[in-house]
Image (cartoon, grey):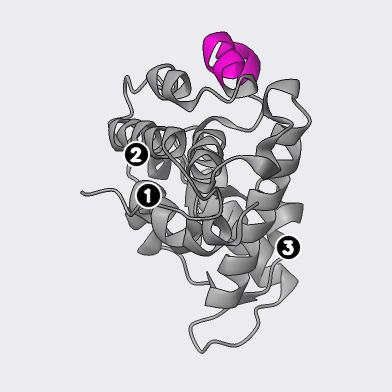
C-alpha cells in the first residue's frame, strides 16, 4: 500500500463513514465503534482499552456491562451512532481508534490481494488502491466475485473500465451515493496516473 493512501485514509473515509469513540449499534444490530469497526462479539470489545469519563482505563466488567447495555437497546440500530452517544459512558482514545482503523485497513488489503483480480494491488496507482479499499470498507473485502466486470477490468489494469463498473447499490443507504462518486473519480485519476505513488483524490464534498 502506498504511503500516501495510508496517510490519507482516515480523513478520506471519515467523511464517508463517520467516526465515533463510543459503542453503537449498526443497522444490523451489531455493536460497532470507530469508523464502522465491528466489536461484536463482546470479546472483541474487551481486547480494546476503553476509558471512563475521567479518561481512566475501564475495568473488564465495566466494558462488558456497557457492551451488553448497547447490544440490548435495539432501538439504537435505527437511530444512528449519535443516539448511542447519549447512553454510552466509555470511549476509546484517539491512538486506539487509529490503531483499530489501520488494523482493519491492512486486513482488508491482505484479503483483497489474495484474489487474482487484485493480486497486483501493491503496484497499482495510489488512487486505484484508495478506491478499492473504499469499496472493501463498505462491502467487505470479499466482494470481488459479485463484481465480475469490475474484477476483470482491475485484473487488466483498465482503471477507466473499473470506474464505469465500480458502483455499489445505494438503495436504502444514501451515504453510498457519495462513496460511489468518490470511488469513480479515484479510478479515473488512476487511469491517468503518471506517478503511481502520488494520490490525487481528496476528501469527497458533503
From the viewer's perspective, tell me whether residue 115 is left or right of residue 180.
right
Say if 27 sits above or below 93 in the image. Answer: above
Along the polypeptide, which appears first: circle 2 or circle 3? 3
Along the polypeptide, which appears first: circle 3 or circle 1? 3
Question: Which residue shows up at 53% across the image and 72% down it?
Answer: 90
Tell me if I can see residue 108 in this picture. Answer: no
Point out the frontmost of discs 3 and 1.
1
Q: Are the residues at dot 1 and dot 2 in contact (C-beta closer than 8 Å)?
A: yes
Point out the frontmost of discs 1 and 2.
1
Residue with the mark numbered 2: 182
Along the polypeptide, which appears first: circle 1 or circle 2? 2
From the viewer's perspective, tell me whether residue 147 is left or right of residue 110.
left
Magenta: main secondary structure equals helix
Say if 204 sits above or below 181 in the image. Answer: below
Residue with the mark numbered 1: 201
Look at the numbered disc 2 and give the secondary structure of its residue. Answer: helix
From the viewer's perspective, tell me whether residue 109 is left or right of residue 180.
right
Per the rendering, the mark at residue 46 is 3
Q: Are the residues at dot 2 and dot 3 in contact (C-beta closer than 8 Å)?
A: no
Question: Which residue shows up at 53% across the image and 48% down it?
Answer: 126
Q: Residues within 10 Å of mark 2 (few under 14, many from 20)?
A: many
Amino acid at each position: 500500500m502506498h504511503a500516501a493512501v495510508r496517510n490519507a485514509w482516515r480523513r478520506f473515509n471519515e467523511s464517508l463513514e463517520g467516526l465515533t469513540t463510543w459503542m453503537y449499534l449498526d443497522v444490523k444490530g451489531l455493536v460497532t465503534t470507530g469508523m464502522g469497526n465491528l466489536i461484536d462479539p463482546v470479546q472483541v470489545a474487551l481486547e480494546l482499552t476503553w476509558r471512563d469519563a475521567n479518561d481512566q482505563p475501564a475495568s473488564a466488567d465495566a466494558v462488558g456491562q456497557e457492551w451488553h447495555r448497547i447490544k440490548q437497546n435495539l432501538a439504537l440500530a435505527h437511530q444512528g451512532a449519535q443516539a448511542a452517544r447519549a447512553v454510552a459512558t466509555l470511549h476509546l482514545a484517539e491512538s486506539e481508534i487509529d490503531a483499530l482503523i489501520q488494523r482493519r485497513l491492512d486486513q482488508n488489503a491482505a484479503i483483497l490481494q489474495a484474489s487474482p483480480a487484485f493480486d497486483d494491488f501493491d503496484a497499482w496507482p495510489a488512487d486505484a488502491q484508495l478506491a478499492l479499499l473504499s469499496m472493501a470498507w463498505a462491502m467487505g473485502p470479499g466482494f470481488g466475485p459479485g463484481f465480475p466486470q469490475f474484477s476483470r477490468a482491475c485484473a487488466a489494469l483498465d482503471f477507466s473500465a473499473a470506474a464505469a463498473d465500480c458502483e455499489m447499490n445505494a438503495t436504502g443507504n444514501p451515504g453510498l451515493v457519495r462513496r460511489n462518486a468518490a470511488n469513480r473519480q479515484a479510478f479515473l485519476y488512476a487511469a491517468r496516473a503518471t506517478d503511481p505513488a502520488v494520490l490525487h483524490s481528496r476528501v469527497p464534498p458533503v
